[in-house]
Amino acid sequence: MDEQDNKNFQVVTGGFHRVWTFRISAGPPFQLTLPNHFPLDYQGGVVIWKLVGSKGLADSALGIMEGIGATVDVFFEEETSEQTEERIATIAGIDPFPFSE
Protein backbone atom coordinates (compact mmCIF):
# COMPACT_ATOMS: atom_id res chain seq x y z
CA MET A 1 0.00 0.00 0.00
CA ASP A 2 1.59 3.30 -1.02
CA GLU A 3 1.26 6.55 0.91
CA GLN A 4 -1.76 7.79 -1.08
CA ASP A 5 -3.56 4.45 -0.66
CA ASN A 6 -2.86 4.62 3.06
CA LYS A 7 -4.37 8.13 3.27
CA ASN A 8 -7.42 6.97 1.32
CA PHE A 9 -7.73 3.95 3.63
CA GLN A 10 -7.72 6.22 6.68
CA VAL A 11 -10.43 8.44 5.21
CA VAL A 12 -12.66 5.51 4.28
CA THR A 13 -12.24 3.56 7.52
CA GLY A 14 -12.01 6.48 9.91
CA GLY A 15 -8.42 5.76 10.92
CA PHE A 16 -6.15 2.90 11.66
CA HIS A 17 -7.52 -0.30 13.05
CA ARG A 18 -7.18 -1.07 16.73
CA VAL A 19 -8.17 -3.90 19.01
CA TRP A 20 -11.34 -2.90 20.85
CA THR A 21 -12.59 -4.76 23.91
CA PHE A 22 -16.30 -4.77 24.67
CA ARG A 23 -17.46 -5.77 28.15
CA ILE A 24 -21.17 -6.53 28.00
CA SER A 25 -22.60 -6.82 31.52
CA ALA A 26 -26.37 -6.56 31.22
CA GLY A 27 -29.22 -6.47 28.76
CA PRO A 28 -31.46 -8.76 26.76
CA PRO A 29 -29.99 -11.72 24.86
CA PHE A 30 -28.79 -10.78 21.39
CA GLN A 31 -26.48 -11.83 18.59
CA LEU A 32 -24.17 -9.61 16.58
CA THR A 33 -22.26 -10.74 13.50
CA LEU A 34 -19.74 -8.59 11.66
CA PRO A 35 -17.65 -9.61 8.65
CA ASN A 36 -14.27 -11.08 9.61
CA HIS A 37 -15.09 -11.24 13.33
CA PHE A 38 -16.21 -13.93 15.71
CA PRO A 39 -19.96 -13.63 16.25
CA LEU A 40 -21.16 -12.25 19.57
CA ASP A 41 -23.86 -14.34 21.22
CA TYR A 42 -24.88 -12.59 24.42
CA GLN A 43 -27.10 -14.68 26.68
CA GLY A 44 -26.63 -12.75 29.93
CA GLY A 45 -23.91 -12.40 32.52
CA VAL A 46 -20.61 -10.73 31.71
CA VAL A 47 -19.10 -11.30 28.26
CA ILE A 48 -15.85 -9.99 26.78
CA TRP A 49 -15.83 -9.57 23.00
CA LYS A 50 -12.97 -8.30 20.80
CA LEU A 51 -13.26 -6.30 17.61
CA VAL A 52 -10.44 -5.26 15.28
CA GLY A 53 -11.37 -2.15 13.37
CA SER A 54 -11.60 1.61 13.22
CA LYS A 55 -13.18 3.83 15.85
CA GLY A 56 -16.14 4.24 13.51
CA LEU A 57 -16.73 0.49 13.39
CA ALA A 58 -16.39 0.23 17.17
CA ASP A 59 -18.83 3.11 17.64
CA SER A 60 -21.31 1.44 15.28
CA ALA A 61 -21.12 -1.86 17.15
CA LEU A 62 -21.54 -0.04 20.46
CA GLY A 63 -24.54 1.85 19.11
CA ILE A 64 -26.21 -1.40 18.02
CA MET A 65 -25.62 -2.99 21.43
CA GLU A 66 -26.82 0.02 23.39
CA GLY A 67 -29.78 0.40 21.03
CA ILE A 68 -31.12 -2.98 22.11
CA GLY A 69 -30.60 -2.19 25.79
CA ALA A 70 -27.19 -3.73 26.56
CA THR A 71 -24.87 -2.26 29.18
CA VAL A 72 -21.46 -2.03 27.51
CA ASP A 73 -18.03 -0.71 28.44
CA VAL A 74 -15.55 -0.27 25.58
CA PHE A 75 -11.84 0.38 25.54
CA PHE A 76 -9.03 -0.06 23.05
CA GLU A 77 -5.70 -1.62 23.69
CA GLU A 78 -2.65 0.57 23.21
CA GLU A 79 0.85 -0.69 22.86
CA THR A 80 3.76 0.76 24.80
CA SER A 81 6.61 2.48 22.95
CA GLU A 82 8.70 -0.66 23.52
CA GLN A 83 5.99 -2.83 21.95
CA THR A 84 5.81 -0.46 18.97
CA GLU A 85 9.58 -0.70 18.45
CA GLU A 86 9.44 -4.50 18.71
CA ARG A 87 6.53 -4.72 16.25
CA ILE A 88 8.25 -2.47 13.70
CA ALA A 89 11.55 -4.35 14.03
CA THR A 90 9.78 -7.69 13.60
CA ILE A 91 7.93 -6.49 10.50
CA ALA A 92 11.23 -5.19 9.07
CA GLY A 93 12.90 -8.56 9.70
CA ILE A 94 15.23 -7.17 12.34
CA ASP A 95 15.84 -9.09 15.57
CA PRO A 96 14.20 -6.84 18.20
CA PHE A 97 16.32 -8.49 20.92
CA PRO A 98 19.82 -8.73 19.42
CA PHE A 99 21.55 -9.20 22.78
CA SER A 100 19.18 -11.71 24.37
CA GLU A 101 20.10 -15.37 24.70
Image (cartoon, rainbow, N blue to C red):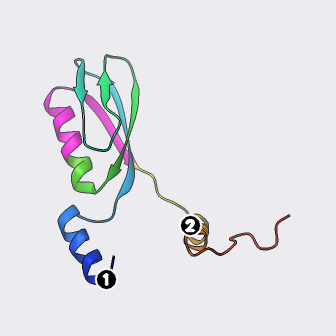
Q: Is residue 80 left or right of residue 4?
A: right
Measured from the top left, where is residue 47 in percent x and y? Answer: 39, 26
- Asked whether 84 or 1 is in front, the reply is 1
Q: Which residue is mark 1?
A: 3
Badge 2: residue crowd in 10 Å (few <14, some 14–19, many ≥20): some
- Asked whether 100 or 83 is in front, the reply is 100
Residue 53 highlighted magenta (yes or no):
no
Q: Which residue is mark 2?
A: 87
Instruction: Answer with the quarter of the image where residue 100 lies.
Output: bottom right
Tell me what residue is drawn at x 18 percent, y 46 percent: 60
Measured from the top left, where is residue 68 in percent x and y? Answer: 15, 27
Measured from the top left, where is residue 46 in percent x and y? Answer: 40, 23
Measured from the top left, where is residue 78 in percent x and y? Answer: 47, 58
Residue farthest right in this picture: 101
User: Residue 25 bears which disc, if any?
Assistant: none
What is the secondary structure assignment of the residue under circle 2? helix
Tell me what residue is drawn at x 29 percent, y 75 percent: 6
Q: What is the distance, in whole Å, between disc 1 and disc 2 at their CAs?
A: 20 Å
Q: Is residue 28 left or right of residue 96?
A: left
Instruction: Answer with the quarter of the image where residue 2 lies.
Output: bottom left
Residue 64 highlighted magenta (yes or no):
yes
Residue farthest left in this picture: 67
* Magenta-drawn segment: 60-75
